[in-house]
Image: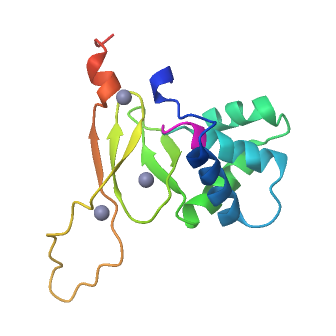
Amino acid sequence: MTTPSHHRADRGTASAMDRVGDALDSLGGTATGPRRAIVDVLVTEDLLQTPEQILAAARVSAPSTSLATVYRTLERLHAAGRVKRATLASGAIGYAYCGGGHHDHAICTRCGRVVPVGACATAAWEAPPGFRAESHELNFYGTCEGCSADPVE
Ligand SMILES: [Zn+2]
Ligand SMILES: [Zn+2]
Ligand SMILES: [Zn+2]
């Protein structure tokens, strides 16, 4: 999977810093080098990344990062509602940073880009009689702006 430059979030913006802080806060405890590196990788790309890809990128700044730490950190972030987990076109499970309350997602099946959908699309949904809905997860799968503009290889 490629990660075109137009998908890279600006590391220097306040929002990227806020996302790092928010994700680290949700983990609690001490922000170790590997943990910080994993969070940094997640907030820098608005792309679904596999644990193996996250490991490789995190090791650039924190060489001691292990795959077990990546899985444990992703699990905790997911439980805290800070990461989105979805199946990639390859069948692998990808993870992307996701914060700021409930929203639905548009996912590009070509590059794995994850775009939050502004308004929840299920407002008109009616529960079956007696059913109490507590949550839902809605993904729109398709092709993002950048990939639509690129010719198919
Ligand atoms: Zn999200
Ligand atoms: Zn795309
Ligand atoms: Zn929704």
Magenta: main secondary structure: loop
Rendering coords of residue 71 (x, y %)? 66, 51
Position of residue 80 in the picture relative to residue 1 (left or right): right
Residue 100 versus residue 143: which sits nearer the camera? 100
What residue is drawn where x is 49% and y is 43%?
93
- Residue that appears at 84% across and 34% down: 63
Is 67 located above or below residue 100 in the figure? Answer: above
Residue 68 in sight from this viewpoint: no
Measured as percent of width and height from the top left, residue 56 is found at 70, 31
- From this view, report whether residue 60 is shown above or below residue 76: above
When the figure is inspected, residue 14 is found, relative to residue 5, above or below; the finding is: below
Is 122 on the left or on the right of 111, as rendered?
Answer: left
Check the picture and name the quadrant holding the C terminus. top left
| Image coordinates for residue 120, horizontal then vertical, percent | 27, 62
| Total number of numbered discs in the rendering | 0
Quadrant location, ligand no. 2:
top left
Residue plotted at (80% across, 56% down): 31
Q: Can residue 82 be seen by looking at this rendering? A: yes
Q: Residue furthest bottom?
A: 130
| Left or right: where 109 falls relative to 27 | left
- Where residue 38 appears, as percent x and y from the top left, is 69, 44
Q: Is residue 46 magenta?
A: yes
Q: Which residues are magenta?
A: 43-47
Q: Is residue 124 left or right of residue 121?
A: left
At 52% from the left and 30% from the top, the residue drawn is 8
